[in-house]
Structures are given as structure tokens and as C-alpha cells.
Image (cartoon, helix red, strand yellow):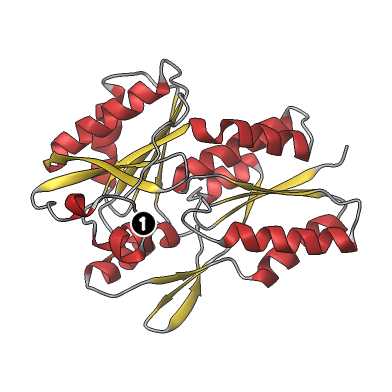
């Protein structure tokens, strides 16, 4: 059985420390500001993150791209030529078409290297929900599972990763086409906060509204604790330059359940371009997601 390399992408929002701890690589997407393109690195510090989100607060548009084909090709090929297989766990296909390009590249490389195993798994989520699946894949690799066994395992549990969060403004999500909600929902947001989950299709779905952020914090906490269904293993919270809000959400959740581990991380530039500054999102593992959002 061959060893294998685990790849995420720029939407997984795992810190360098976590990637190094679990042996996770990532392929970079790109983002553009004022017609200048930058690689979407996950290795930014708090000052860099604040500067990025301040640009958005000032009204600048941030445009994002998929992982370029050559990045997939070069990254996967290097692993194969080093005698290793590849597992790529992508951003939700409902939010990014990158996984489709990865599959094309995988098929091309399999023609060149018939004995290579390259599995591309659609995570059906993003940010630290995707990151959680990457960490679980690493743990299965450490337990001796093959690349195919690990990929199958991730496909079997991916809908048990529950997401719930809120945004400072729906402007970014609606403009980017990254959220499902009824027209009536969008037409009446003054003074309220949307509660957004990831549904069975991997879409961001604004499924209810509450008055003000304190109530949103309670709603998110209750949703995540209920979804964990007694399995209080890991709580993950990502935020777009609003650490204080992330800490308040963490504390609200921990009032209700004692999670063994809590991970806080910045939302990276790709997810951040779609959700906007002031976003806070929590993730827990537990019950399978059953909600399917429709307009």
C-alpha cells in the first residue's frame, strides 16, 4: 500500500500550524483587487487579514478564481513521481467549480501513470468544515487506511459536518451568488441577522432570521450543539476579522456543551471575498444534514 498526500485548497482556512501538524498540503486559488492578481495564501497573520478586510470595508471588490489547471497538474504529478498517491478534498462544488478541474487533471494523469491513485472528493462545505474533513483524512491515514479507503470514509461522513453562522451584511453573499434564500428573505433584513447553514447540496442557505447579533449568537450556538447530538469532540470557528465575535460565539456554545477541542481561525481571502468582513461561522460534527435549501 502506497503512502498518499492530502490536499485541500485555499477555502479550507487551516492555519499553517494545523497543516503542518496533520501533514496537509493545499493548492492555491487566486484573487484579484484593482486588476492585480494574488495567490490566495492561508499563511496570513492578523495584520494582513485586517488589511485585506479593510479593503473590502472601503468598498473594493475582491474577485476570485478557481485553482489553475497547471497548479493541480504540477502538484499531483510531483506526488506521483515521488511514489505517492493523491487525495484532494475540495471546496463544495456548489460554491466553486475547482473540483471539476481537479477531476479532469486526475484523469489525464492516470493515463500517464496508470498505477497512480488520485481521488478527488467534494467536501460539500468550505472554510473550517472542509478543514475538519482534511484533519479527519489525516487521522485515517495515520491509522493505516489507503487513499481509497480514506476517500470513501470522507465521502461517508461529509454531510455530518454541520455549519452555522451569520454575516455582517448579505451584500457579499448575494452579489457573489453564494447563498440560497427566498426573495422575501432578502427583502426584509433591516435590523436582523441571517442564520446561514451549509445544506445537503453544499450550498450556503439562509434558513432563518433573528433580531440582532446577540440573538444570532444564541441561535447559532443552539443549532450547533443540537447538531452535535452529544458528540462534543471538536468545535471549529472561523471569522472574517472579528475575533471578539468569534470568542463570544465560542463562549456561548461552551455554556451549553463541553467540547474537547476548540479551533479558531481566520476566514481566508477566498471564502472572505464571498462572505465579507464581520462574518463568523461555527462547525461541529454530529447529525447528518437533512435541510435542502430551495429558492
Q: Quadrant of the N terminus?
A: top right
Q: Residue at x 24, y 62 (%)?
A: 171
- Could you say where residue 290 lies in the image, as x and y percent from the top left? 43, 31
Q: Residue furthest front?
A: 295
From this viewpoint, is residue 292 visible? Answer: yes
**In this view, 61 is above or below 232:** below
Q: Residue at x 50, y 57 (%)?
A: 42
In front: 185, or 144? 185
Residue located beneath label 1 in the image:
46
**In this view, 166 is above or below 170:** above
Q: Is residue 113 left or right of residue 215?
A: right
Q: Residue at x 29, y 41 (%)?
A: 246
- Could you say where residue 288 lies in the image, as x and y percent from the top left? 47, 27
From this viewpoint, is residue 27 visible? Answer: no
In front: 27, or 174? 174
Corner quadrant of residue 289: top left
In front: 122, or 264? 122
Amino acid at each position: 500500500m502506497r503512502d498518499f498526500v492530502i490536499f485541500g485548497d485555499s477555502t479550507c482556512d487551516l492555519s499553517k500550524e494545523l497543516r503542518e501538524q496533520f501533514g496537509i498540503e493545499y493548492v492555491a486559488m487566486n484573487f484579484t483587487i484593482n486588476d492585480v492578481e494574488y495567490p490566495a495564501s492561508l499563511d496570513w497573520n492578523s495584520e494582513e487579514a485586517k488589511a485585506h478586510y479593510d479593503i473590502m470595508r472601503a468598498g473594493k471588490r475582491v474577485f476570485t478564481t478557481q485553482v489553475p489547471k497547471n497548479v493541480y497538474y504540477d502538484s499531483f504529478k510531483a506526488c506521483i513521481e515521488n511514489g505517492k498517491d493523491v487525495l484532494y478534498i475540495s471546496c463544495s462544488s456548489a460554491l466553486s467549480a475547482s473540483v471539476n478541474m481537479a477531476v479532469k487533471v486526475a484523469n489525464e494523469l492516470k493515463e500517464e501513470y496508470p498505477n497512480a491513485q488520485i481521488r478527488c472528493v467534494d467536501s460539500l462545505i468550505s472554510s473550517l468544515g472542509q478543514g475538519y474533513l482534511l484533519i479527519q483524512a489525516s487521522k485515517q491515514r495515520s491509522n493505516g487506511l489507503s487513499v481509497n479507503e480514506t476517500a470513501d470514509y470522507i465521502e461517508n461522513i461529509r454531510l455530518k459536518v454541520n455549519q452555522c453562522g451569520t454575516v455582517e451584511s448579505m451584500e457579499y453573499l448575494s452579489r457573489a451568488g453564494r447563498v440560497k434564500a427566498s426573495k422575501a428573505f432578502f427583502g426584509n433584513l433591516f435590523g436582523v441577522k441571517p442564520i446561514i447553514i451549509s445544506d445537503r447540496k453544499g450550498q450556503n442557505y439562509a434558513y432563518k432570521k433573528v433580531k440582532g447579533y446577540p440573538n444570532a449568537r444564541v441561535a447559532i450556538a443552539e443549532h450547533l450543539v443540537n447538531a452535535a447530538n452529544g458528540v462534543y469532540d471538536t468545535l471549529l470557528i472561523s471569522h472574517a476579522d472579528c475575533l471578539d465575535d468569534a470568542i463570544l460565539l465560542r463562549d456561548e456554545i461552551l455554556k451549553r456543551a463541553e467540547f474537547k477541542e476548540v479551533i479558531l481561525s481566520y476566514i481566508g481571502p477566498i471564502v472572505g471575498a464571498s462572505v465579507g468582513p464581520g462574518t463568523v461561522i461555527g462547525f461541529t460534527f454530529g447529525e447528518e444534514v437533512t435541510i435542502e435549501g430551495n429558492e
